[in-house]
Amino acid sequence: MGDDITRLTPKGQQRAERFLSVALEVFIEQGYEKASVNEVVRRAGGSLSTLYKMFGNKEGLFIAIIEQRALSIFAPLEQALADNSSPIDGLTRFGHRLLDFLLEPEALAMYRLVLNDLHRHPVMARHFLDHGPFQTLDRLTRYLAHHVSQGHLIIDDPRLAAGEFSGMLISDLHIQVMVGQVPNLPPEERQRRVASAVRRFMASV
Amino acid sequence: MGDDITRLTPKGQQRAERFLSVALEVFIEQGYEKASVNEVVRRAGGSLSTLYKMFGNKEGLFIAIIEQRALSIFAPLEQALADNSSPIDGLTRFGHRLLDFLLEPEALAMYRLVLNDLHRHPVMARHFLDHGPFQTLDRLTRYLAHHVSQGHLIIDDPRLAAGEFSGMLISDLHIQVMVGQVPNLPPEERQRRVASAVRRFMASV
DNA sequence: CAAAAAGTGTAGCGTATGCTACGTTTTTTC
DNA sequence: GAAAAAACGTAGCATACGCTACACTTTTTG
């Protein structure tokens, strides 16, 4: 924390990246508290001293991971929405990506990690929300607003509606997924859920 | 685990209950991994030996808590639905209770605790799901089905619809709440969210 | 290629944890 | 009220952890 800022030599850069990716792996496996910094070094190679010079302490390591990775897991969702698509198509595509995202084991573990341990780091939590889920939601909001302005939809509060649509898709899957009881949702079932949410949403706008 | 089963003497019963409630408190404060069994005894009184005779080990203590408490946090939700209420009234009442539940700090902490640590205990996770969230969802499902049979609503798959309605309410609040960034949602805002979800749902049935 | 900077390896300090052992005191049982 | 059972208190074992110190080797820089 109050340490010198390490200059990034090639070797150092490489080490830092390896530390981060291995640490993510360990954190996901064990959770923040149980994960051991020594174990990270053991798997990553390099030395404990270097790790501590780079990240200050365990928390610094965790924060660096969030900065680097947590946000990018939301990126694919935003690409599903092209303004020139019809609402039904756009929402359907978005819905499929959202479900895929929810069921992806790695993203899921990462998500759980964030939920577990971010509530004691308000600044990071804010950062995560703003650049992760909220950004995605804002994109969906703009998409809806666009179609409202085109006269295709009638929505009072597009932001609220965007949340409602996402929520409908996730619904009770979320809790199942989080406690590890993932029904290995066959494609027809995903199809059915997306179609139902889109239909219900479109019926109300 | 492989220990004698403790006979329940009055004193013992009392101790066990105190252990459980204090342990819940400590687990909520610190999370499962970080919480210390010694700390539980320190706060609860009694002795470490007694605790270990009663619950076997730390995990046993955690499991006993889940058995006793985790399920009861869902109970109030089910009472919101009386079959003879109109769908709008019933769903509105259910919606308000669901939001209240989501924002209740203690239930929230408990919920987070469950999410954190239950995914490595499949049996417990199943038990929790079946007797907690799923039971609530089933109640809502029956409520909807009842009104379908009365001709008040048209719903293909009431179970799916129940999930969608709940999901709409929770929507993006869930993630905010979980990472501790709870907007202290004023009553008008809750009102607005519930009303919107009910309206949107009713427009689609 | 030499000086400076960065990365390495290891040993270990201080502390905390889960859990057990065991002798004493309290509570329950009949 | 005495024998049996349960609860208590304490001390401590074994282990693991986060983190620092320090002497060393490798890499980078000019």
Image (cartoon, coloured by chain):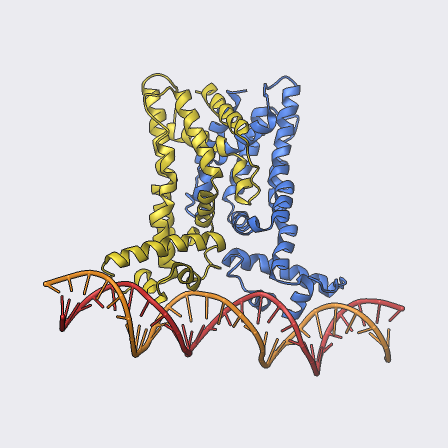
Chain colours: A yellow, B blue, C red, D orange
Residue ID at (67%, 68%): B50
Q: Give the left or right position of residue A83, taking residue A40 as reference.
A: left
Which quadrant of the figure has residue A184?
A: top right
Nearer the observer, B85 or B29: B29
Residue C27 position in % (x across, y down): 75, 70
Q: Give the left or right position of residue B155, taking residue A70 as reference.
A: right
Q: Give the left or right position of residue B173, taking residue A55 as reference.
A: right
Q: Quadrant of the C terminus of chain B?
A: top right
Q: Is residue B102 visible?
A: yes
Residue A168 position in % (x across, y down): 49, 30
- Give the total of numbered labels: 0
Q: Is residue A40 above or below residue B151?
A: below
Q: Is residue B188 visible?
A: no
Q: Is residue B21 above or below residue A191?
A: below
Nearer the observer, C14 or A102: A102
Which quadrant of the figure has residue D4?
A: bottom right
Q: Give the left or right position of residue C3, taking residue A46 as reference.
A: left
Residue ID at (48%, 43%): A105
Which quadrant of the figure has residue A4?
A: bottom left
Residue B175 position in % (x across, y down): 45, 42
Residue A195 position in % (x across, y down): 49, 23
Q: Quadrant of the N terminus of chain B?
A: bottom right
